[in-house]
Each structure stands twice: as C-alpha cells, then as structure tokens.
Amino acid sequence: MFELTVLVDNNTLIDKYFLGEPALSFYIEYDGKKILFDTGYSDVILKNAEKMGIKLEYLDYIVLSHGHNDHTGGLKYLIDFYKNLEHKPQLIASPNVFAQRFDDIDGEFGSPVPQNEIERVFDVQYTSKPLFLTPNINFLGKIPRINNYGGHDAIGLLKESNQPDFVDDDSALAIHVNNEIILVTGCSHSGIINICEYAKRVLGLKNFNSIIGGLHLQNVSQSQFLYTQTELNKLNLKSLYACHCTGLEAICKLAEEIKICEVGVGLKLVM
C-alpha cells in the first residue's frame, strides 16, 4: 500500500491545525521503506511530524528534489535531530544540489546548510542517473529537457560561477503502484511534461495515476501554460494534487479540464 502525507506546504487543511509555510515536504511509506521527500524551510517539519505521530527517527531515505531553501531549509533542524541518533537515513540528491544561489531581490536562496556539514551527518549519494530506491520507487536524477516549455528559464545565479542558474539539479520521484505511475515533484523546474515523459521511460509504464507537488506555473507564458494543460490532460490522470509553487490562477485554469484535488498540510493519500 502506498501512503503519502503532506508534512509541509503553503496551505493547511481546515480543522487540522498544523503549521504551514511557503515550502514543501512529503512523508512517504511504500515497499517497506520510509522516505522524506524535501524538508521544507524551517523546523515546521519537525513540529508537524510530531503532532502527526510520524517517527522521523525511523526514516530510510531523505530525498531532495532540488537545492532551493524552501526544500532544503529543514536540513538544519534535521541535522540536530539526527546527530545523536545511531540510525540515520541516507540522503539522495542530484549533483550540485548544494550549490549556492542568489539574485538581487531575494539574496541567497540555496541550501542554508553547507555541503560539508550535511555530509558529516548523513551518508549522501549524488546521482544524475535514475536510481531505484526499491523495485518500485525511482529517483529520476537529471531530467532531460526535451520540449521548449519548461526548464529553459534561469532562476537567479550560481554564486561560484556567477552564471545563470537553470536548476539542473531538479528531480522527482516516479513510483510504480498497480501498473500506474504516481509522480512526486518538488517544483518541476525541469518542466512537468518533461518529467512525466522521463518517468514513463524510466519505469517502462504508460499510464499515470496521480501527480502531487509543485508545477511551477506561476507567471509562465500563455503558450507554455496551454501546452502544459493540453499534455497533462492527455495523461488521463485520476487526480492532480497541484500545490506549493503552482499558483492559484494556474490551478483554477487546470481545473477546467483536469480533476484537481485540494492539497494542504495534513493531507494523507492512500493508494
């Protein structure tokens, strides 16, 4: 049985009384493994997990979708949480995930924890190639950007080189459940359709069940939005849990053709 719980998101479900922040983290149980996908921005992840009764000390993996601080900021608090525990989860991420990033408006927004500090606590495996964490859970690594509607706009600069940052470390989890794909994304900086196509190729499956995560459709061009909406519609999704960086206007427009489900901290999916 596949289970996913939203630990951190911009929104919280009504009457649940958890904490929200503009960030993302999911807790996943499947194939006998416990996985934390992204870590949010602050210690909200620990507070919500405790209130939900989720025992983070038993995690097998921490998986990072990419290196922005709203997905890696919680590592600061997880380091303190795990440093005195004998068991520590393995951390999985793309190379360059801990690169420092900045722009003139927001300043630095890469991981607030230095790479060497993280590696002192966690066994980190970097991979740009697909990696099966279990026979049915795949970390996709670097996503090929094969269309012109996603992954071609820089977000700030890389501090070391002072060059535009195209977030090449962006990745996702592709999960095989009952001969269908459940796709778990962070922000989909590679382009959600690129991610979907790669997930199909890596898992060798054609049919999708659901997508949950950020789709990064705020402020995109009309042509990019229409392309994305059309291609998502072709997937015949049973449900789309668009959250975090998708944008309210984009969610409303997607809902004209696709079944959109509410997302917030406290949501639990069982499939």
Image: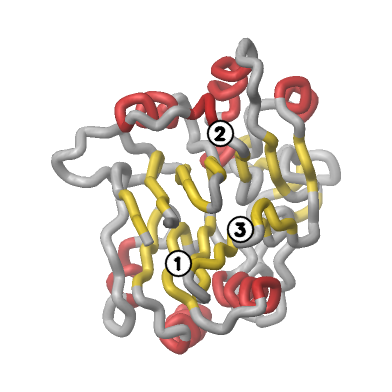
**Is 235 displayed left or right of 76 in the figure?**
left
> Label 2: which residue?
59
Q: Which mark is residue 15?
A: none
Q: Is residue 133 visible?
A: yes
> Label 3: which residue?
137
Provide the secondary structure element on which disc 3 rests: strand
Front of the two marks 2 and 1 = 2
Query: At label 3, which amino acid type do we have?
Result: Ile
Q: Which mark is residue 211?
A: 1
Q: Gap between marks 3 and 1, in whole Å?
A: 14 Å
The quadrant of the rendering that contains the C terminus is bottom left
Of 244 and 61, the residue lying toward us: 61
Q: Residues within 10 Å of mark 3 (few under 14, many from 20)?
A: many
Query: At label 1, which amino acid type do we have?
Result: Ile
**Is 262 displayed left or right of 185 in the figure?**
left
Question: Is residue 36 shown above or below 150?
Answer: above
Query: At label 2, which amino acid type do we have?
Result: Leu
| Residue occupying image coordinates x 65% and y 72% | 203
Image spot of residue 161 (x, y percent):
85, 45
Give residue 85's quadrant in the image.
Answer: top right
Mark 2 or mark 3: name the one nearer the start of the chain. 2
